[in-house]
Image (cartoon, rainbow, N blue to C red):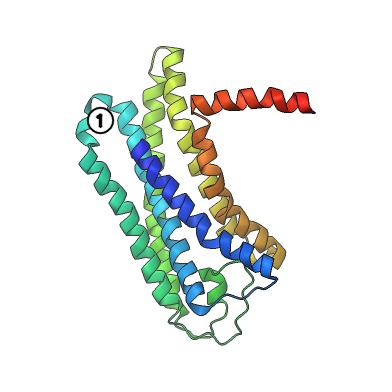
Amino acid sequence: MYFFLLNLALLDLGAISTTVPKSMHNSLRDTQDISYAGCVAQVFLFSFFMSAEFCLLAIMSYDRYVAICRPLHYETLLGSRVCLHLAASAWGCGALNALLHTASTFSLPLCQGNSLDQFFCEIPPILKLSCSTSYLRELWLLVASGCLFFVCFVLIVVSYVQIFRAVLRIPSQQGRHKAFATCLPHLAVVSLCISTGSIAYLTPSSISSSSLDLVVSVLYSVVPPAVNPLIYSLRNQELKAALSKLSPGCFQNQ
C-alpha cells in the first residue's frame, strides 16, 4: 500500500506542478502569455499525470481487495515484482494516452485566435480554436480514453463490491471498523477525483461561462492533488497527535 501511495504522491506533485507555478508566475508578472512549447508541455504533462493517477487508483482498489478478501495470498498475488509491474503499467498507460492526445491536438490547424478561456493549456479549449474537420480524430481519441477510464472505474466498483461483501461477513464490529478504515482514504480520493472530473467534463454547454469554467477547472486540476495527501495523512497517528497538540494552543491564542 505504501509503495502505491508513494507513486500517488509523485503523480499528485507532478499534476499540481504542471499548472499552478505557471499560473502564479503569470499573476505576479500581470500577464496571461505562455509559449507554444510551454503549452504543448502543459497538455502532455497534465494528461499524463491525471491518466496515470486514475489507473493507479484502480490498481490500489485491487490492492485493497487482495489485502482484505485474500490476505493469505497477498504476498503471492502482490509481491514486490508484481507491484513494480503494476505501477509501471499505470505510468506507461498515462504516458501513451498523453502522447497520443498531445500529438493529435497540436497537429490541428488553429485558425480562431490564440486565446484560451482557461488558466492553463488543456485539450478542450484548444480544440475550440481549430477550424479543421480533422478534430474528429481527437474525438475518437477522447472516446478511447473514456473507455480506459471506464475499465478502471469498473475495476474499482467490482473490487469494492467484493470488499464490502467480505467486510460485512466479519463477525466483530472492531474488525469491520478496521477493514473499512483501511479503505476509507482510498474511497475518498476516488470519489473526489471522479466527482470533480465529472463536473468539469459533463457540465452542459448551455450553462457554461468563462467564470464557471475557470472555477470548475481549478476544482478538478488543483483541489484533488492538493487534498489527496491530506486525506491519507489523516490516518497517520503522529500527525493526529501533532494536530491535537496544536489545536488547544490555537484556541488559547484566540
Residue to which mark 1 is pinned: 74
Q: Relative to residue 160, is residue 77 drawn left or right? A: left
Q: Residue furthest right?
A: 254
Q: Relative to residue 149, is residue 233 drawn left or right? A: right
Task: Give the mark count.
Answer: 1
In the picture, the quarter occupied by the C terminus is top right
Q: What residue is at 34 percent from the left and 33 percent from the top?
A: 65
Q: What residue is at 37 percent from the left and 59 percent from the top?
A: 94
Out of 213 and 8, give the one closest to the viewer: 8
Q: Position of residue 52 (x, y in %)?
A: 39, 54
Q: Quadrant of residue 205?
A: bottom right
Q: What residue is at 68 percent from the left and 65 percent from the top?
A: 28
In the picture, the quarter occupied by the N terminus is top left
Q: Residues within 10 Å of mark 1 (few under 14, many from 20)?
A: some
Q: Position of residue 14 (x, y in %)?
A: 46, 55
Q: Is residue 23 visible?
A: yes
Q: Amino acid at mark 1?
A: Tyr
Q: Is residue 195 visible?
A: no
Out of 231 and 240, give the one closest to the viewer: 240
For label 1, the SS is: helix
Out of 194 and 23, give the one closest to the viewer: 23
Q: Is residue 73 above or below residue 108?
A: above
Q: Position of residue 18 (x, y in %)?
A: 51, 61
